[in-house]
Amino acid sequence: MENSKVIAEAKKLGLDKVGFCSAKDFNQNFKSVIAAVFPYYTGKIDGANISKYCFGLDYHKVVSRTLSRLADALGLNGFEIFCDIGKNDDRKIAHRCGLGFYGINSLIINEEYGSYFFIGYIFCNEDFEYSAPVNTVCKRCMACKNACPAGAVRGDFTIDADKCLSNVTQKKGELQCNEIAMIKENNSVFGCDICQDVCPHNKNAKKSHFDAFTKNLITKLEYEDLANLSNKEFLKKYGERAFAWRGKKVVERNLSYIKDGKSEK
């Protein structure tokens, strides 16, 4: 299949950054990978207490639906679609497909959208002309390393995931004192954008053109929003949002920490 056919059909679906690579190192059951960028940046929003990737609809569902439509348009048979799930290294696939370069904070940076994007890809058995990795490299200014409240950014293109505030906000059960303190100090209900917000490569990041990530946004949650909701009511109200996958308890716990922190002042 010609790359141009994929690119043309992808553009009809709003996908303006598409790349191709061999599937050999990722899934032995397929020949090739078609990967695409799904930008979600909406600009700076003051007062937000959840990560930017959670403002819109659940990206897993949006990406899967969009790539399913692409696969249908291409007439693909025997394909598999992935987005931030499974054993594959999404960032490595994006890099191989020429969609961006690694940042010191381990994220993939696209020259147009910065690091504010989701990665979706299709494993298939078509032959393509594979993309070349981009030549651009991270500035290595260490702004992300210096700003990380958890000290999770090591400075060598890797992070300590166990320390990462984004991961801490998603842990189940009771948290350690230092973890609770981080949530309070950074007003982080779900996720964290600090290492991305200080990155110079994101200074002029282009805003998303996907309605799913730019309309009917939820940028802030309050304890009172969840306190009287049952688990079923929580899922009915927020089930289409990325932060809902961990369930009500985790989100409500973090909100309670922040509420307690405010009352302590």
Image (cartoon, rainbow, N blue to C red):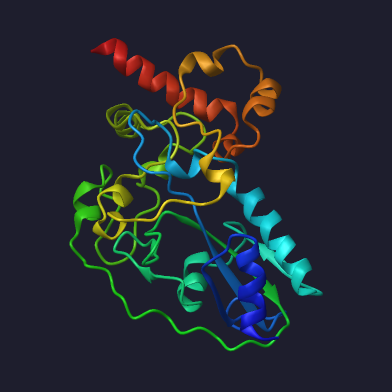
Give the residue at x 60% y 43%.
58
Find residue 125 and report its image quarter. Answer: bottom right
Give the residue at x 30% y 10%.
263
On screen, residue 112 versus residue 122, left or right, reads: left
Quarter containing the C terminus:
top left
On screen, residue 87 versus residue 179, left or right, reads: right
Quarter containing the N terminus:
bottom right
Q: Where is residue 150 in the image (x, y as percent from the top left)?
A: 28, 44
Q: In this view, does 217 lie above or below 25?
A: above
Of residues 44 and 190, which is closer to you in this image?
44
In this figure, what is the number of numbered marks?
0
Q: Position of residue 97 (x, y in %)?
A: 51, 77
Q: Position of residue 41 (x, y in %)?
A: 43, 48
Of residues 230 and 133, which is closer to you in this image?
133
Q: In this view, does 121 lie above or below 146?
A: below
Q: Position of residue 224 (x, y in %)?
A: 50, 13
Find residue 186 and report its image quarter. Answer: top left
Give the residue at x 21% y 66%.
140
Give the residue at x 68% y 73%.
123
Q: Is residue 224 above or below residue 181?
A: above
Of residues 103 and 70, which is closer to you in this image?
70
Q: Can residue 121 be seen in this view?
A: no
On screen, residue 114 versus residue 226, left or right, reads: left
Q: Can residue 44 be seen in this view?
A: yes
